[in-house]
Image (cartoon, helix red, strand yellow):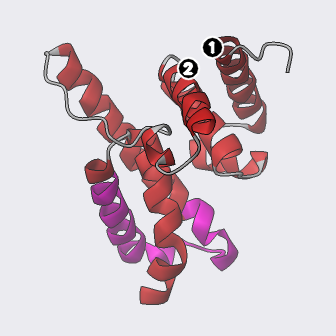
Amino acid sequence: MKQLYDRHGRYIAGLSARLLRSREEAEEVLQDTFVQAFTQLEQLRDGDAFRPWLAQIAVRLARRRLKKQRLFRFFGIRGEEDASLYLLSEGAPAEARSELRRLDEALLRVPEEQRIAWMLRHVEGEPLEQVAQVCGCSLATVKRWIDAADVQVRRATGKEDA
């Protein structure tokens, strides 16, 4: 079990932090993801699919937390958002940080499903088939979501010709 955590923990922690924009909440999702995975490990039929299965659990948990965050914001309760792409770029050159700030702000305007799919594909570098599996939708749907997010990101970052 420790080997699985050592091998995949950093990926799940990073994914969760980028989706939730909170290191504290990401740490909770990381822990909850591995608790669920270890208690449901017998349900996994293909050992090679462990990482996407783990990501699917983490994304599901992150979605629940995002829904809770929206509810809190609706009632005027707002938590700290400390894990934006911009803030995770500490130590990067000023130009790169500026670019990441614009990207981060653009992604905040993208619908949640599209943002998750876009980040899995472009930030995490996951293949489209795996993004669809993690998002729990068809390949065609995930492609549409990523394309729609791409349009908004390019527009917001001034790279519409890219």
State left or right for residue 144 relative to residue 41: right
Confirm or deny contact between disc 1 and disc 2 (CB under 8 A).
Answer: yes
Which residue: 42% across, 41% down? 87
Q: In the figure, residue 123 lies in which quadrant?
A: top right
In this view, which residue lies farthest toward the right? 161
Q: Which mark is residue 156?
A: 1
Q: In the figure, residue 99 lies in which quadrant?
A: top right
* Amino acid type of the residue that numbered disc 2 sits on in the rendered structure: Ala
In this view, which residue lies farthest toward the front? 94
Residue 97: x %, y % from top left: 55, 36
Q: In the rendered structure, which disc, 1 or 2, sits on the residue that comes first in sequence? A: 2
- On screen, residue 104 above or below 21: above
Q: Which residue is mark 2?
A: 106
The magenta stretch is 26-53
Q: Is residue 47 magenta?
A: yes
Q: Is residue 59 visible?
A: no
Which residue: 34% across, 34% down? 66
